[in-house]
Amino acid sequence: MIVLGIESTAHTFSIGIAKNGKKIQILANCDAKYPSPQEGYIPRKLADHHAEAFRETLLIALKEARVSMKEISAVAFSQGSGIGHCLHVGFVAANALSKKLNVPLIPINHSIAHIEIGKELYCKTNDPLIVYVSGGNTQIIVFDKKTKRYHVYGETIDVGLGNFLDVLGRKLKLNPPDAIGVMKSAKGEFIELPYTVRGMNLAFSGLLTFIEKKVIPQVKSKKIKNGDVCFSAQETVFAMLCEAVERALCHTNKKEVLLCGGNARNARLQEMLKEVCNEHHVQFTVTSFEHSGDQGAMIALTGIKILKSKAIPKEVKPKQRLRTDATEVYW
Ligand code: FE2
């Protein structure tokens, strides 16, 4: 059983190939990334990039996996959530490929794929508390056996944590103008910033407005350095997330925390969450650099699990606002 997975929810177009075995094996994970522009992403340009990248990425992935098209048992793709234009390109490519090969087409909930690859390849237990942080999402999740769904315990009530850092990177004109730029520049003096935790939920947009109105003018007048803003912003938002995670740990008594999603790559966030885990004597697990961001491998891996269950969803159209808790996890 070999599944090809197509990921195209945002700025990355990726194809992964996974094989069923005692443990699911990733045979290939290839991508083409659209670089972060200073003006932000334009959906139409992203979609054009993905459409152009499809053929070459497919050929490289097949070569890397050392499999032929005939050996593919199913084609999986990111159904959502994501940017409409980008999702559509992935859907059209996957649909065409599945028809050409005469194999099943498997729609995948993108957020769940981030979790599944973490659980399958990295977790020590089968039931972690999941901290999913990316551009569009920031969620604290547990699996609910009764409803067979991932239950969102807490989340952002406005923008994703990654999106907040990306916008901050652009406003400060960092290089690159995104969360990576913020992480690289985060050295300096701590400045007190608004801290918004509401129960189990978080909010970042007020903090962004505060930085824009009160802090950036001081950067321009050279009273504060870019590094101070990046350092303080990271410390503040990561502390907010850690507070909610700590509360979720106390409620759920989970023995492991899984950090996944694109912003799981941030070393400072890893360090802070690890400290929380150590204090509560629970295992801290983070997905590898390669398997944290958006990638086809997680789509192919989740595709294998669904194909094995022999219950492939019939509704395959892309869904821009597909939530983590909207999909039943029956596999
Ligand atoms: Fe993602």
Image (cartoon, rainbow, N blue to C red):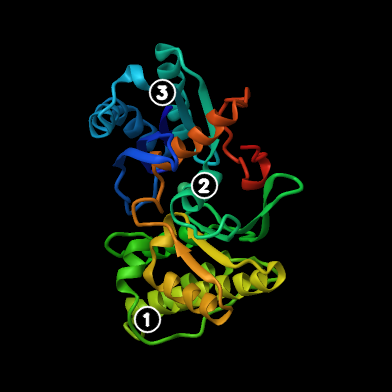
Give the quarter of the image for residue 216. Answer: bottom left
The image shows residue 259 at horizontal and vertical percentages of 49, 61
Q: Is residue 314 above or below residue 121?
A: above
Asked which secondary structure carries label 3, the reply is helix
Q: Between disc 2 and disc 1, whose residue precedes?
A: 2
Asked which secondary structure carries label 1, the reply is helix
Please give the residue where the numbered disc 3 appears in the rendered image.
93
Total tally of numbered discs in the picture: 3
Please give the residue where the numbered disc 2 appears in the rendered image.
116
Q: For mark 1, does the 10 Å Cα neighbourhood hold few (<14), some (14 to 19), or many (20 or more) residues?
A: some
Q: Which mark is residue 228?
A: 1
Q: Which of the image's four quarters has the N terminus?
A: top left
Q: Between disc 3 and disc 1, whose residue precedes?
A: 3
Looking at mark 3, is its residue's CB closer than 8 Å to ligand 1?
Answer: no
77 left or right of 66 in image: right
Residue at image position (37%, 70%) is: 267
Q: Estimate the spatial distance between the alpha carbons at disc 2 and disc 3, rounded to whole Å.
A: 23 Å
- The residue at the far right in this view is 146
75 left or right of 26 in image: right
In the image, 157 versus 293, the foreground residue is: 293
Looking at mark 1, is its residue's CB closer than 8 Å to ligand 1?
Answer: no
**Which is in the foreground here, disc 2 or disc 3?**
2
Give the quarter of the image for residue 66. Answer: top left
Q: Which of the image's four quarters has the C terminus?
A: top right
**Which is in the foreground here, disc 3 or disc 1?**
3
Asked which secondary structure carries label 2, the reply is helix
84 left or right of 100 in image: right
The image shows residue 295 at horizontal and vertical percentages of 39, 43
Q: Between disc 2 and disc 3, whose residue precedes?
A: 3
- Disc 1 residue type (three-letter): Asp
- Disc 2 residue type (three-letter): Glu
In the image, 246 versus 91, the foreground residue is: 246
